[in-house]
């Protein structure tokens, strides 16, 4: 009963965290239900159409599932880590680890159920649109009626709920595993090393991505149907691997950048300090930047290479191009939404910090410069590793299809995607900070 009251009290008093969690789970559930609805439609389709729908749902939807789960877990973990001080205070006044765990898991479950229910309506229309597109491109019979039924609802809701509960349980374990005094001390200064399990998992995923690149470049001759499937997986796996390693990567990079940043003035000095003592929290912002840059650059450039060097009949090539752009577009759009959502959630929760800085003499413009400098560093690091992830697909695919190490299409796509990543990251950083600064300094600086 106490845990239930805490759940609803926390959701009511922390609207920013609630909205950020809801957005992540809503968009994730929408993508999952959209692709899962193809399995409902398959029941009424013929053998050939059913095979196409099954492949589309399992292969393409499967990669969408991996990306959605990873991004959702990352966002929810970041939001829960931001509450370390609050949860530590609960422990200091007598809350047991099981009560705190039930509160965190209960919050995640409530938001996940609401997000899944809200995602049903847009998923119905998205599923119809996707089946219609498959019909227009000749992948299934034209006029095939789209169905949205129990498979879509159960898979979308179940996986979304599982992702939310898993993230909540993992984050709760980290919080409740510490003593109250230690948790309060580390709430603002979190320099713990990245866990061994995470490093091992990230290394394995990254190695798998590199393996896809090697196979693409050395095994295939350039005309096999599986070339795009294997090649495209390289960037996705590499992006996820780098994103998992982001807390471990940001620490050494912060040490290298410390001296140049300090020469940039007060904002640079504070940025260097924040990168050093809050690397785990700031690394959460790197995840969507790496995913967006890596997946978008890798897959879109791969399709551009195929358009130039493709040998398939024009009609088939056009159909595949349309489907690839649509599928990639959905995943990249999700990554872009998660980027903005994560940045806004991370910045808005720092209102108290901004208020305290203003109370000791910092002007709003100085706070904005601090946030802008942090954002610039994070987007530079995220773009760097996202670009490396994209290269795992672009370079091997270019060698296999054209014999060239660097395709001529790469630079244009890369610059456009980097420009979007920079605009989204800095725009959301400065926009959220400007909104947070509207709160009077005294009110913000003393708010718990």
Image (spheres, rainbow, N blue to C red):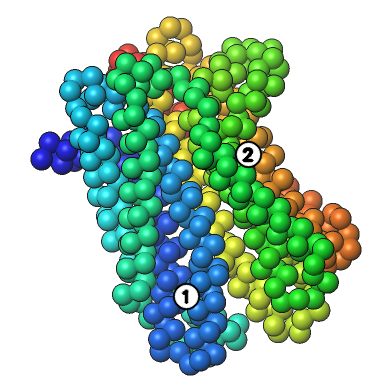
Numbered circle sitting on residue 382? 2
Query: Is residue 286 in sight in this rendering?
Result: no
- Looking at marks 2 and 1 on the same chain, the residue that comes earlier in the sequence is marked by 1
Whether the residues at callouts 2 and 1 have beta carbons within 8 Å, the answer is no
Give the quarter of the image for residue 169: top left
Seen at 44% across and 13% down, the residue is 357
Taking 250 as reference, is 334 above or below it?
A: below
Residue 45 seen anywhere in this rendered image of the structure: yes
> Gap in Å between the C-alphas at discs 2 and 1?
33 Å
Q: Could you tell me which residue is drawn at 65 percent across and 79 percent down?
A: 319
| Left or right, 299 with reference to 402 | left
Give the residue at the far top of this rendering: 360
Name which residue lies at 23% across and 40% down: 102
Q: Position of residue 87 (x, y in %)?
A: 28, 27
How many numbered marks are there? Answer: 2
Q: Secondary structure at mark 2?
A: helix
Q: Residue furthest left?
A: 1
Give me the residue at 79% from left, 70% from top.
Answer: 220
* Image position, residue 408 (x, y; %): 84, 57
Q: Nearer the viewer, residue 204 or 236?
A: 204
Quadrant for residue 78, please give it. Answer: top left
412 versus 63 height, above or below:
above
Q: Secondary structure at mark 1?
A: helix
- Left or right relative to 174: residue 138: right
Q: Give the number of the disc on residue 212.
A: none
The correct choice, above or below, for 8 with respect to 297 in the image is above
List x then y, in percent, for residue 269.
60, 14
Q: Residues within 10 Å of mark 1 (few under 14, many from 20)?
A: some
Q: Position of residue 226 (x, y in %)?
A: 70, 73
Q: Residue furthest right?
A: 403
In this orientation, which residue lies closer to the viewer: 310 or 181? 181
Dot 1 corresponds to which residue?
129
């Amino acid at each position: 009963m106490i845990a239930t009251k805490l759940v609803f009290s926390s959701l009511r008093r922390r609207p920013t965290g609630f909205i950020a969690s809801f957005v992540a789970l809503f968009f994730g559930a929408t993508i999952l239900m959209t692709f899962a609805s193809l399995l409902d439609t398959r029941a009424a389709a013929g053998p050939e159409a059913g095979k196409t729908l099954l492949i589309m749902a399992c292969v393409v939807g499967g990669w969408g599932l991996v990306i959605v789960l990873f991004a959702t877990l990352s966002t929810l973990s970041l939001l829960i880590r931001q509450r370390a001080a609050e949860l530590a205070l609960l422990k200091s006044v007598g809350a047991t680890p099981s009560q705190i765990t039930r509160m965190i898991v209960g919050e995640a479950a409530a938001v996940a159920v609401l997000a899944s229910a809200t995602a049903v309506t847009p998923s119905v229309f998205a599923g119809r649109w996707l089946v219609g597109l498959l019909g227009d491109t000749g992948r299934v019979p034209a006029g095939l009626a789209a169905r949205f039924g129990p498979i879509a609802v159960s898979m979308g809701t179940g996986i979304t709920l599982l992702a939310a509960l898993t993230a909540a349980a993992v984050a709760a374990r980290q919080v409740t595993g510490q003593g109250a005094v230690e948790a309060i001390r580390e709430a603002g200064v979190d320099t713990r090393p990245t866990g061994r399990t995470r490093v091992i998992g990230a290394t394995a995923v990254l190695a798998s991505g590199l393996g896809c690149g090697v196979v693409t470049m050395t095994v295939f001759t350039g005309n096999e149907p599986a070339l795009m499937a294997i090649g495209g997986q390289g960037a996705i796996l590499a992006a996820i691997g780098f994103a998992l390693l982001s807390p471990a990567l940001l620490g050494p990079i912060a040490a290298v950048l410390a001296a140049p940043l300090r020469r940039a003035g007060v904002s640079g000095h504070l940025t260097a300090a924040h990168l050093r003592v809050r690397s785990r929290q700031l690394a959460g912002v790197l995840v969507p930047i790496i995913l967006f840059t890596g997946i978008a650059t890798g897959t879109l450039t791969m399709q551009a290479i195929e358009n130039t060097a493709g040998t398939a009949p024009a009609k088939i090539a056009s159909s595949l191009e349309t489907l690839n752009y649509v599928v990639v577009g959905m995943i990249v759009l999700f990554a872009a939404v998660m980027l903005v959502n994560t940045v806004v959630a991370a910045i808005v929760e720092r209102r108290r910090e901004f208020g305290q800085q203003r109370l000791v003499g910092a002007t709003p413009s100085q706070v904005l410069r601090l946030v802008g400098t942090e954002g610039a560093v994070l987007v530079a690091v995220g773009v760097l590793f996202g670009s490396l992830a994209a290269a795992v697909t672009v370079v091997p695919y270019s060698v296999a299809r054209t014999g060239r190490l660097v395709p001529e299409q790469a630079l244009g796509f890369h610059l456009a995607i980097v420009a979007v990543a920079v605009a989204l990251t800095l725009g959301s950083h400065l926009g959220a900070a400007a909104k947070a600064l509207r709160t009077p300094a005294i009110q913000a600086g003393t708010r718990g």
